[in-house]
Image (cartoon, helix red, strand yellow):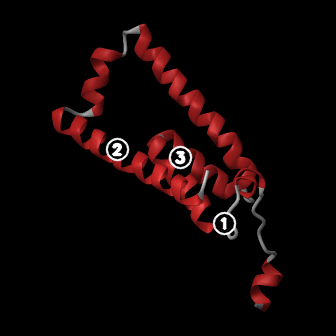
Amino acid sequence: MTKWLLVLFCMSVLTAMTLLTTFASLDRSVLHGGVGLWPDPWFIATLADAYFGFLTFYLWLSYKEPTWLRRVIWLVAILTLGNFAMAGYLLWQVLRLRPFTIESLLLKRHTTKPITEIASA
């Protein structure tokens, strides 16, 4: 898969989620919509499936991110924004890699520079 196909995919997810969320929000609030759905076992199973998917993606993200602060910020973003945050993170990763390879996207860990190295730059 090429870099630009991944960029197109991420942009498509962000666009689709924005359109679908806007469409649903114009109908009613997410809190109002959830009242009727909560008793349904399939709603609970689907919601659990989504959040287990979010946490699975987060395991990869926490491997990639060098600091606990960034890991926590991304966890909160994923748990509150779902696929918006996940597509945004993947897009950010794809665009910052030079040179881009799937292996570097999936496996390359980011490192932080020590404070002394940053101060002397």
Image location of residue 102, percent across then percent down: 70, 53
Question: Which residue appears at 77% of the width and 52% of the height?
Answer: 107
Image location of residue 21, percent across then percent down: 30, 40
- Residue on which the image places disc 2: 16
Q: Is residue 34 above or below residue 8?
A: above
Give the CA distance from mark 1 to mark 3.
17 Å
- Counting residues from the start of the chain, the first of labels 2 and 1 encountered is 2
Question: Which residue appears at 43% of the width and 8% of the height?
Answer: 41
Is the C terminus in the top left, top right, bottom left or bottom right quadrant?
bottom right
Residue lying at the far front of the rendered structure: 1
Q: Secondary structure at mark 3?
A: helix
Q: Secondary structure at mark 1?
A: loop
- Counting residues from the start of the chain, the first of labels 1 and 3 encountered is 3
Which quadrant would residue 94 be assigned to in this image?
bottom right
Q: Is residue 111 above or below residue 61?
A: below
- Residue on which the image places disc 1: 97
Residue type beneath disc 1: Leu
Image location of residue 11, percent across then percent down: 43, 54
Question: Which residue appears at 78% of the width and 78% of the height?
Answer: 115
Q: Nearer the viewer, residue 79 or 22?
A: 22
Residue type beneath disc 2: Ala
- Counting residues from the start of the chain, the first of labels 2 and 3 encountered is 2
Q: Indicate left or right for 63 with 84 as reference.
A: right
Residue type beneath disc 3: Met
Give the CA distance from mark 2 to mark 3.
14 Å
Q: Indicate left or right for 65 with 117 as reference.
A: left
Give the CA distance from mark 2 to mark 1.
25 Å
| Tag 1 and tag 3, C-beta contact below 8 Å | no
- Residue on which the image places disc 3: 86
